[in-house]
């Protein structure tokens, strides 16, 4: 009986780690595409220049080599960062700025202000 309980706990823990890794991978990939857009443009520019330089050395596969290298670099950076965050024990639910990922709404106590309010709110009839 005790063996089945410890085995079940191990499965639950490994599923939690896999789930955390996949969530971190998704989150970091989205952040790289959205927030890191200037970085992507810079990498594309450097990649174009590098493929022009390599074209004289190996004309057949310079563009393929550079494009594959840049894509592999991005994928490996996301997977490595997700692995580090997962094995450090940082769960995505613990990160405050990831509330959009869990479907949690921010409680903002704001009142609605309409465009005509500064003109008409103080009028008493």
Image: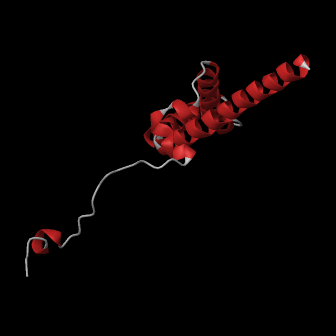
Q: Is residue 72 left or right of residue 110?
A: right
Q: Is residue 65 visible?
A: no
Q: Is residue 19 left or right of residue 47?
A: right
Who is closer to the viewer here, 104 or 67?
Answer: 104
Q: Position of residue 31 (x, y in %)?
A: 51, 40
Can you give x and y, in whole percent of width and height, for residue 21 in the image?
A: 67, 30
Q: Is residue 38 left or right of residue 30?
A: left
18 sits left or right of 89 in the view: right
Is the image coloured rainbow, by chain, by secondary structure, or in one colour? secondary structure
Q: Find residue 54 and report its horizontal and vertical position in percent.
A: 60, 30
Residue 93 percent coordinates (x, y):
55, 34
Q: Height in image: 79 above or below 23?
A: above
Of residues 29 and 54, the one drawn nearer to the viewer in this rendering: 29
Quadrant of the frame with the N terminus: top right
- Is there any visible trace of residue 64 in the rendered image? yes
| Viewer-proximal residue among 80 and 123 | 123
* Point 52% across, 38% down: residue: 32
In this view, the residue farthest toward the bottom is 125
Figure label count: 0
Residue 61 image-quadrant placement:
top right
Q: Is residue 51 above or below residue 100?
A: above
Residue at point 7%, 77% (across, down): 124
* Rendered residue at 8%/82% (across/down): 125
Q: Residue at x 64, y 33 (%)?
A: 75
């Amino acid at each position: 009986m005790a063996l089945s309980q410890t085995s079940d706990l191990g499965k639950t823990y490994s599923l939690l780690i896999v789930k955390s890794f996949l969530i971190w991978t998704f989150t970091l990939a989205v952040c790289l595409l959205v927030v890191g857009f200037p970085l992507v443009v810079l990498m594309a520019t450097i990649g174009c220049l590098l493929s022009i330089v390599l074209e004289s050395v190996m004309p057949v596969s310079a563009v393929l080599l550079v494009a594959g290298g840049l894509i592999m670099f991005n994928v490996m950076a996301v997977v490595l960062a997700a692995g580090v965050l997962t094995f450090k024990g940082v769960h995505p639910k613990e990160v405050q700025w990831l509330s959009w990922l869990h479907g949690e709404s921010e409680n903002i106590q704001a009142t609605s202000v309409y465009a005509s309010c500064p003109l008409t709110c103080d009028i008493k009839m």
